Amino acid sequence: MFAEERREQILSKLKSLGRVFAKELAEEFQVSIDTIRRDLTTMEEDGLLKRTHGGAVPLSKVRRFPMDDRIRYSEGTEHQNAVAKLAASYIEQGDTLFIGGASIHYILLKFIPTDRDYTVVTNSLLIAEKLKHHSNIETYIVCGKVKSEEGIVDPLAIEFIRTLRIDTAFLTGGGISAKHGLSSSTPEGAIFQRAVAEVSRHKICLANFDKVGTEFFARTVGLNNLDVLITDWEAPDEEIEKIRQMGVKVLVAEEH
């Protein structure tokens, strides 16, 4: 089998399965794992996929349409849970935090501490509803037009957030890269998160492996405006090193 034919089949499998593993591909095509790794590297350079430690995932489009809430607000993947658990360790007594309405923020709620008092500002009705049952948390919701897929991100919300000061903001987006910084699917969401970053003393980006090295439609903030990136064990080493060189502290959650 020629390399081009093998790569076409790899791409076909990736589209149907949503992910491929180098070890399994090597066994299936009866070639060395180094050959498969070279295939995946070439395909990544051609903009056909995104490599991970163990294989590859599809390359994200620069726009991502709203996902079903049953998927978005679920138990999450092992990677998301590892990132969220590590992020929760940054919450301290007396903090004022920003927690948005992304799926990683919903998962973060499973790990937030209950043995200390702090304040949360959110632009998500669902997050606010979950937090109101915590006696140790004082919750504020951003005012503005309700838009379910992104939370409240309109000009009124931006004006409101600019009147506040926040200790730590847990930011996220569609992707983060050394070249493009943190980015989102929509300009509205990016502008709102930028406003949050501007009023926050400490900015922590939560991004599981498939977001690292990915660039989305609208830039949120540059890496010079981020303090910490929390990702997981499958994030690409080369991109992590580039982000570190830009002055961002990168924490890699371990596999459990």
Image (cartoon, grey):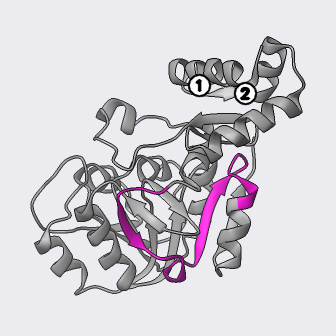
Q: Position of residue 82 (x, y in %)?
A: 64, 48
Left or right, 61 with reference to 151: right
Seen from the viewer's position, the closer of residues 223 and 15 is 15
Q: Position of residue 153 (x, y in %)?
A: 20, 64
Residue lying at 38% horizontally and 32% vertically, measured from the top left: 71
Q: Is residue 244 above or below residue 66?
A: below
Left or right, 221 with reference to 31: left
> Is disc 2 placed on a helix, strand or loop?
strand
Q: Is residue 204 above or below residue 21?
A: below
The label on residue 21 is 2
The label on residue 11 is 1
- Quarter of the figure with residue 9: top right
Q: Magenta segment, which residues?
A: 215-238
What is the total number of numbered labels drawn onto the structure image? 2
What type is the residue that disc 1 sits on? Leu
- Quarter of the figure with residue 164: bottom left
What type is the residue that disc 2 sits on? Phe
Image quadrant occupied by the C terminus: top right
Instruction: Tell me the crowding category of disc 1: few under 14, some 14 to 19, or many 20 or more residues within 10 angstroms, Cα based.
Output: many
